[in-house]
Image: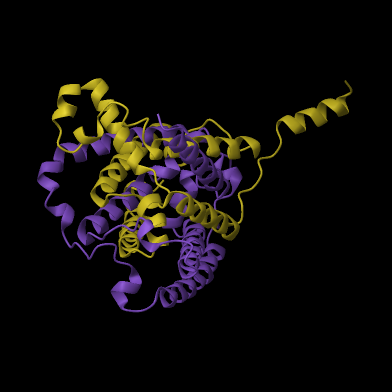
Chain colours: A purple, B yellow
């Protein structure tokens, strides 16, 4: 077995899980709070994370330290990705987690997260059984290979990044207002099953 | 031991759980971990790839003939497919890292979260149903919130933003269903 894969995977995973739990993303109630608009943590954590990584990658590319072709950039298949993303969102609204966060929920002692994990495997099986009928749909609305927002809009990635920073700032502002108008973000005591 | 000492001991062993990190700080930390993963491996973080391999592995244990005959799972059902994949070790790492963070902050707590709102049995049925929706959806999208939403968007791939659009739109709509009220 390739020890490089094990060390690299474990190291990246430990850091990922450590940050996700500290963000409160082991709590299904906190994650669901985003869709109830009382707790904007999913937006406030994910958006800056995407921007930090995207700006870092773009800067490293500009410096020639990262070769663009060495990066994995997924190719769009519009309809299955929109519908699949919708089902993952619906799954979080109903069940409290997404695949990665359910692993963190389980790691912090949540039995509901373990049951969600069992559901993930079952849902994968349902998909695998239905696959012959879905195969054509999987490429519906296929875009150009490795298309980025900059390619799509015909602008530089730096213009896209500037627009995304502005969108994130707007989201922080309006999300913060909604949090203050409602019951507010799910606290650690609530996430551990206590009253507020 | 005096009462005072006992009190101090009890207070220490039941130390109040530490609060979560502020979202912006957590987001920047997550972004740096993601950036380091890209530099280190050429790809981002994920989760769903592991569950697909796990579904194939469980299938080979429970129903080997049906799994080997399944067009979608059989390419992932070979011996060593699960233990030989980077994503498997990354998910093992996520569980270790999540446990480490929860345990050191006094947040490890065995519970059915949300049972106060829904009752434990209903909460677990909802968790199972939600997991099935997400498992099916992640296969349809060929990725999940981590792999496409987070890592795909970090490469500015259109695919990542399409996924996130569907994810937030459906999540906002579905969480308004009467089924999910108290």
Vertical placement of residue B85 versus B19, above or below: above
Which percent across, then down, holds residue A149?
A: 34, 70
Vertical placement of residue B43 versus A177, above or below: above
Which percent across, then down, holds residue B12?
A: 76, 32
Identified at 24% across, 30% down, the residue is B77
Q: Residue furthest right?
A: B2
- Determine which quarter of the picture holds residue B3: top right
Which percent across, then down, holds residue A88?
A: 32, 50
Vertical placement of residue A63 versus A15, above or below: below
Tag count in the figure? 0
- Determine which quarter of the picture holds residue B23: bottom right
Q: Is residue A17 left or right of residue B150?
A: right
Identified at 51% across, 46% down, the residue is A16
- The answer to whether residue B116 of the structure is visible from this angle is no
Which percent across, then down, holds residue A31?
A: 46, 50
- The answer to whether residue B71 of the structure is visible from this angle is yes
Residues B84 and B181: in front is: B84
Quadrant in which the N terminus of chain A is drawn: top left
Q: Is residue B91 left or right of residue B132?
A: right
């Amino acid at each position: 077995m390739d020890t490089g894969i094990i060390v690299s995977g474990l190291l990246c995973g430990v850091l990922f899980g450590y940050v996700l739990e500290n963000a409160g993303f082991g709590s299904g109630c906190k994650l669901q709070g985003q869709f109830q608009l009382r707790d904007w943590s999913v937006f406030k954590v994910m958006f800056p994370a995407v921007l930090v990584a995207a700006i870092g990658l773009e800067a490293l590319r500009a410096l020639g330290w990262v070769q663009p072709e060495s990066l994995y950039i997924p190719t769009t298949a519009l309809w299955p990705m929109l519908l699949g993303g919708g089902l993952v969102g619906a799954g979080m609204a109903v069940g409290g987690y997404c695949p990665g966060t359910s692993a963190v929920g389980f790691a912090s002692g949540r039995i509901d997260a373990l049951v969600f994990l069992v559901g993930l495997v079952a849902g994968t099986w349902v998909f695998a059984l239905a696959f012959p009928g879905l195969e054509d749909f999987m490429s519906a609305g296929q875009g150009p290979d490795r298309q980025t927002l900059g390619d799509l809009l015909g602008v530089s990635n730096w213009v896209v990044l500037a627009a995304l920073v502005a969108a994130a700032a707007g989201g922080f502002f309006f999300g913060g207002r909604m949090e203050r108008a409602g019951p507010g973000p799910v606290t650690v005591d609530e996430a551990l099953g206590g009253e507020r | 031991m005096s009462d005072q000492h006992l009190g101090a001991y009890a207070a220490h062993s039941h130390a109040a759980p530490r609060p979560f990190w502020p979202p912006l700080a957590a987001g920047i930390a997550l972004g740096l971990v993601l950036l380091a993963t890209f530099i280190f491996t050429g790809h981002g973080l994920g989760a769903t790839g592991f569950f697909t391999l796990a579904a194939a592995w469980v299938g080979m244990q429970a129903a080997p003939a049906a799994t080997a005959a399944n067009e979608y799972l059989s390419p992932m059902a070979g011996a060593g497919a699960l233990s030989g994949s980077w994503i498997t070790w990354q998910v093992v790492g996520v569980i270790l890292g999540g446990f480490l963070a929860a345990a050191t902050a006094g947040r490890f707590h065995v519970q059915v979260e949300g049972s106060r709102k829904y009752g434990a049995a209903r909460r677990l049925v909802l968790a199972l149903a939600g997991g099935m929706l997400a498992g099916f959806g992640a296969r349809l999208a060929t990725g999940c919130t981590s792999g496409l939403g987070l890592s795909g968007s970090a490469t500015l791939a259109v695919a990542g933003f399409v996924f996130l659009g569907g994810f937030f739109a459906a999540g906002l709509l579905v969480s308004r269903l009467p089924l999910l009220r108290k």
